[in-house]
Amino acid sequence: MTSAIFIDGLCKTYPRSWRTPAFEAVRELSLTISEGEVFGFIGPNGAGKSTTIKVLTGVLQPSKGRAELFGKAVSLPAARRGLGYVPENPSLYDYLTPLEILTMGLAIHRVKLPDARKHCMHWLDRFALSHVADKRVRSFSKGMTQRVALAHAMAIQPRLLILDEPLSGLDPVGRKDVVDIFGEYRGAGGTVFLTSHVLHDVERLADRFGLIHRGRLVSVQAPSGLLHGEQTVTVRSAGTAPVSGFVLETKGRWRADVRRDQLWETLDRLRGARHTVLEIRPALTLEDAFFRFLETAAMASPATQGDSLEQEEG
């Protein structure tokens, strides 16, 4: 089976002045993402995420190594046909309407449909934009502009979505709607490569995640593998009586971190105290693991002036 994304030994170096060494934004990155997989690409600001995406979308040429989409070099226009791409801050033709932008996307990607308008209106409706389908984008808020870009990416019937902070600027309702749409796309076999600083979204959506730090891919694993290895769970309950080992979070709500082998005993004590169990989850989240790694990396290899992150936005 052809990989959706194949990266081998990718390096991207930005030149600097003659006094300062060149900055390596991405260093020897190798990664394979299968068709139908949702891959979360996470890391702090300046880690190399956006540079990698710019190489994959043909915006930047790599300094070394190679990258392919569905077996074709990313430098070839054919590699990007059927690619739905949404940057963190979409720059749309603000004199066009959402309907015109989606219709133009179909033409560029050579998507032929019996009723293109109906198809575009379907996706505008999915992103709660049908009521502004014929209004100029220049009057839109950041969140509405983001939704237009997302609707454009889905309307072209993509075989691959590359999303750089796709939920940026969305309100809670918009975030939930977009996550639900991505879930449907994933369920239909779509492939997604996304970055997000909201690690809970990566944890919910991704089959695997990769952690990039200072341009190097340092870990690739499944969120489930990370969390299932944790030997402690967090238990939250509601009740009036105190229970040994539990601390009061708010009035009537309690929390404790419990070893897995003591969970059933703890639940028996909660039942005896007439508590209602509200939540049981691994104590370690993807966000916790992310910060633990960064703390360890900082102690092992403190940043130097040569590791300045000025060249890379994400």
Image: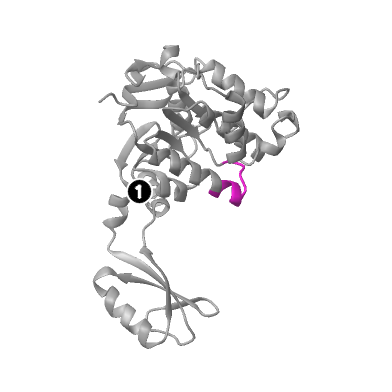
Who's the residue at 44% across and 44% down the image? 183
In terms of image quadrants, where is residue 297?
top left
- Badge 1: few (under 14), some or many (20 or more) residues near its Cα, within 10 Å? few
Q: Secondary structure at mark 1?
A: helix
Q: Is residue 172 above or below residue 267?
A: above
Residue 75 visible here: no
Residue 124 place in picture, x, y as percent: 61, 35
Quick one: 83 or 304, which is closer to the camera?
83
In terms of image quadrants, where is residue 149?
top right
Residue 111 place in picture, x, y as percent: 50, 20
Q: Is residue 132 above or below residue 104?
A: below
Q: Is residue 3 magenta?
A: no
- The range drawn in magenta is 168-176
Residue kind at label 1, given as amino acid type: Thr
Please identify the residue farthest to the front as the structure is shown. 114
Which quarter of the rendering shows the N terminus? top left
Residue 89 visible here: yes
Residue 94 place in picture, x, y as percent: 71, 25
Quick one: 205 or 200, which is closer to the camera?
205
Please identify the residue farthest to the top as the structure is shown. 76
Q: Is residue 304 above or below residue 71?
A: below
Who's the residue at 53% across and 43% down the image? 178
Quick one: 64 or 185, which is closer to the camera?
185
Residue 105 place in picture, x, y as percent: 57, 21
Number of labels in the image equals: 1
Give the colouring mode of the picture. Answer: one colour
- What residue is pinned by disc 1? 296
